[in-house]
Every structure is written in structure tokens, then in C-alpha cells.
Image (spheres, rainbow, N blue to C red):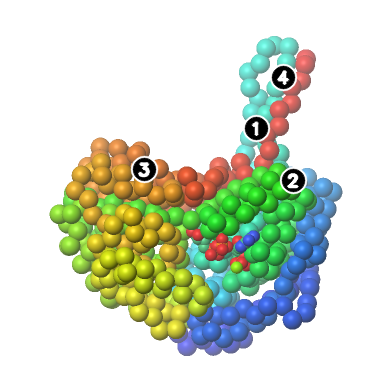
Amino acid sequence: MRDHSEWLALAKDLDLPTQHHIDGRAEGGGQGFPVVSPRDGQVITHVADAGAAEIDLAVAAARRAFDSGPWPRLSPADRGRILLRMAELLEQQREQLALTVTLEMGKPITDAHDIELRAAINTFRWYGQLADKLTDESPHTAPDALALVTREPAGVVGAVVPWNFPLTLASWKVAPALAAGCTVVLKPSESSPLSALLLGQLGTEAGLPPGVLNVVNGDGPTAGQALGLHPGVDVLAFTGSTAVGRHFLRYAADSNLKRVWLELGGKSPNIILPDAPDLERAAATAAWGIFFNQGEMCTAPSRLLVHADIAEQVTEAVVRRARELRVGDPLDPATEMGPLVSSAHLDRVLDHVTTGQAEGARLRVGGEHRENFLQPTVFDQVDPGMRLAREEIFGPVLSVLTFTELDDAVQLANNTEYGLAAGVWTSDLSTAHKVARALRAGTVWVNCYEEGDLTVPFGGMKQSGNGRDKSAHALAKYTELKTTWIQL
Ligand code: NAP
Ligand code: MG
């Protein structure tokens, strides 16, 4: 890992894209919109700003590439080879990409390099390797017929993603969609357009035919809406807030009933029982979980549900970790927490801190900020009805709630409109299985948090969304089932 001064020097002569990537080339100009780094509030560059016309252009390119271009007609092995080449190029450009992510959205460079880039590289590698290992079905029929059940690429995919893991979340959509033979129009968040544009360029460099992967910048209510309403888009894959997820369902209803897949928000519970194998580790993981990536994590374990007998011990350990955490310049490799993504987002998070105090929760640590840098924040004495316990904050703010009976813990855990993830800490095998079964969440972690790899599906129940990213299950989003019945 480079040191602080090396990253600062590299940041000075980083070559940043400024245009859309449409039909295999740079498109669009004009004044565009500024990309502001939350690190210091400075404008890094300006990027072209798409309206409906640029979205039309990108969808038309993706449509041509799907309807008459080579991509869906290539052998799966050939598609796989290009995805593997994308993984190699991501690896080669790892430092520039990590730096771009850190500058645009503020996560610590160590996390950008070691976690975000590793995830993006692994995603392209995994789907590249998977592309030619899929099989279709031929069910047993009567002797006078042959039935085939095949998966066909679903068409043009619109992908709209947020800024908190700009490359990982884009990769989770783009790689399986491309492996399936679809073509893509990706709209990153206006807060993190640069790394996505680099991904678009890198795809063309790896050999994707023109129009297969287009990246268009623009803000949600304009460019995002135009993509959501576009009749030329067959599938819309979205990651973001539950509120905006609802918009995409409406856009589909008001246009062509495109398939809409939603990965949305969360308010995930993390249950610690007195028989946890190691209470210190449980507390350290709870702290890491909520403060990692500045708490800007859909799966953040933002509700710590801890048994009353150990509540003070665990809370004290979490508070200690919060005090030790190094908050600072995200370009310093020793930094553990960087700035929140923007001052507007900081204001939203601070509003939760103020409301929490007004509602009577006890602020144990944090709540203060310098510019966009918020101190890791812990509240205890939180009641289930408080906003602190109900609403997604998407910042480094932990709410501690207590229980005495296991059934109450499960009920408390499920007492939310969300169902993205959950954790439970116990040494008892039966308790672990019973609680895991009872939790309404897409992922349940036992004696760990945020663990996993590409083999397992990821997504939410309830208002945390539908469909799954990662694993072979993700291909269901980007394919349509076809039945062919042949009379013999
Ligand atoms: P967001 O406001 O919902 O934005 C997500 C994307 O939607 C961005 O590209 C945004 O564009 C676009 N958008 C915003 N308003 C739109 C509209 N009216 N029509 C069409 N598109 C629109 O979410 P965020 O604040 O960026 O990200 C935080 C949220 O994402 C949290 O709720 C978090 O839980 C969720 N998330 C979920 C997962 C998961 O896998 N379940 C993973 C990460 C994050 P602009 O930013 O350019 O406006
Ligand atoms: Mg916006």
C-alpha cells in the first residue's frame, strides 16, 4: 500500500473522464455538472449532464447492439473471455480506480483499494468464468414430444446505482447482465460518475462491441427517470433507496411494464445473546459494521439488539471502538472513516442525531462534526418507536436497544418495514438456526457480519426489494424463460 504523500501526488495528475460513454466512444459536452469531492469540498472536474436526449442516444445504441449486434449471438465462452479481460484491466488500473472512488465519494483509500476494487474485480472474474457453464432444461415428457426450457437474454438493461459502492454495485448489475447476453445503459449517481465512466471505457478496451455497455451521467429525477420510463429498456435493475425504488415501479407501470429489480434500503438488526462465543469480538464487529464506509451501507447493522444482562458491557466496548476510530483524510491509508458523501447528506444524518436526543435517547459518543467528517455516533436507551430505531440513517449512527427474552429479540428484529440483513451472536446451535429461520431478511449472519463471497445471493425481503444480486441466481434478472414444445 502506498503512503499518504504518494496517494496525494497520484491524485494530482489523475486522468479523469468528462463525457458520457455511448456506443463505444465519448459523447456529450457543454458545461456539465461539477463533481465535488467530500474530502475538501473542491470541484474535481465537470462531467457532461444527460437529459432525455442523451438517454435516448444510449438506449438506441444498446438496442442496436442487442437487436442486431454480435454480443447476444457470441458463444458464451467468447463473452466470458471479454468479461475476464475486464477483470484483468480492473486489476491493472486498480490504483487509479480506487483513487477515483475515494476522491468522488470519500471512502478511505485502503477500503477503496482493498475492498471495493477487489469486489469489482472478483465480480467480473466470477461471471466471466460462469458464462459458459450454464445449462438449460429438457423436462421428461410423453414419448411423442420434446420440451425445451431455455433462458434467453432479456434485452436492454437499464442499471441505476448509488454512490456508496460505485464500482461494486455497478459490477453486480453489469457483469451478470453481460454474461447473460444483454446490453446495458448504466446511470451512476451524480455523486460518483467518474469511476463508472472509467468502467465503461475499460469495457470497450477489453473488447465489448459498441453499444454493449453505455454509461450516462446525470441526476436521478432527469436522467434516471428518462431511463426508467424508456420504452426501449426491457429490464431496469436498481440499487438505492426505497423511496426511489417506488418511482421505478411507477415508471414501469406508466411505460412498457419493463421488469424492475430493486435492491433497496435497510435498518438491519444485530442480535447479541449472552452466550455469544466472544463478546469482545461481537462488540468490535458491531462497531466495525456500523462505522465501515462511514455507515453508508445498505446492510449496516444500525440496530444493535443486546440482552439486558450484557448491554452495558457490550455498549461500552462499542463506544471504546468509536473513540479509537481514525477519522480523517480518506487519502491517508491509516484512515478508517472518511467524510460523508456531501454536506446535504451530512445535514440529513445530523437531523437524526438531533431528533434522537429530542426523543430521549441517550447519546453515548459522537454527534459532532468538522466539515463533512462526522464522529462515530452511538445512542443507547433507544425505544422501538423512535425515529432512530425505525428510519434508515445511512451514516455512522448506532442505536442500541435491549431485550430480556429471545422471542422479544426476534420480534424487535422483525419490527421494521425493511428486510435486507440481520446478525445473531450465540454459541447455541439450535438458537442460531431457530433465530436465523425466524428473521425476515435476505441475509442472516451468525457470529459474524458482512461476510460472504460471490457464490451467495444478495438482496432483500419486504421493502428492502426483490430479486438477488451475486451468484448464479442474479442471472434470473437478466434472462427470460422460453418453452419450446416439439411434437415428434
Ligand atoms: P437514491 O437517492 O435512491 O439514489 C440511487 C440512484 O437513483 C442514483 O443513481 C440516483 O441518481 C437515482 N435517482 C434518484 N432519484 C431518482 C428519481 N426520482 N428517478 C430516477 N432515479 C433517481 O439513493 P442514494 O442516496 O444514492 O443511496 C442510498 C440508498 O441506497 C440507501 O437507501 C441504501 O440503503 C441504498 N442501497 C441499497 C443497497 C442494496 O443492495 N440493497 C446497496 C447500497 C445502497 P442521483 O444520485 O444522480 O440523483
Ligand atoms: Mg440526487
Q: Earlier in the sequence, mark 4 or mark 2?
A: 4
Residue 240, quarter of picture: bottom right
Between tags 4 and 2, which lies in front?
2
Residue 396, relative to residue 310: is it above or below?
below
Q: Which mark, residue 146?
A: 4
Residue nearer the viewer, 250 or 420: 250
Q: Nearer the viewer, mark 4 or mark 3?
A: 3
User: In the rendered structure, which amino acid carries the disc numbered 1?
Assistant: Asp
Q: Which residue is mark 1?
A: 136
Foreground label between 1 and 3:
3
CB of mark 4 within 8 Å of CB of mark 2? no
The CA span between labels 1 and 4 is 13 Å
Q: Earlier in the sequence, mark 2 or mark 3?
A: 2
**Residue 256: which disc?**
2
* Residue 157 disc label: none
Q: Residue at x 20, y 67 (%)?
A: 316
Identify the residue at image location x=36%, y=62%: 388
Quadrant of the image occupied by residue 360: bottom left
Return the x and y of residue 370 as percentages of the image width and height.
40, 84
Q: Is mark 1 within 8 Å of ligand 1?
A: no
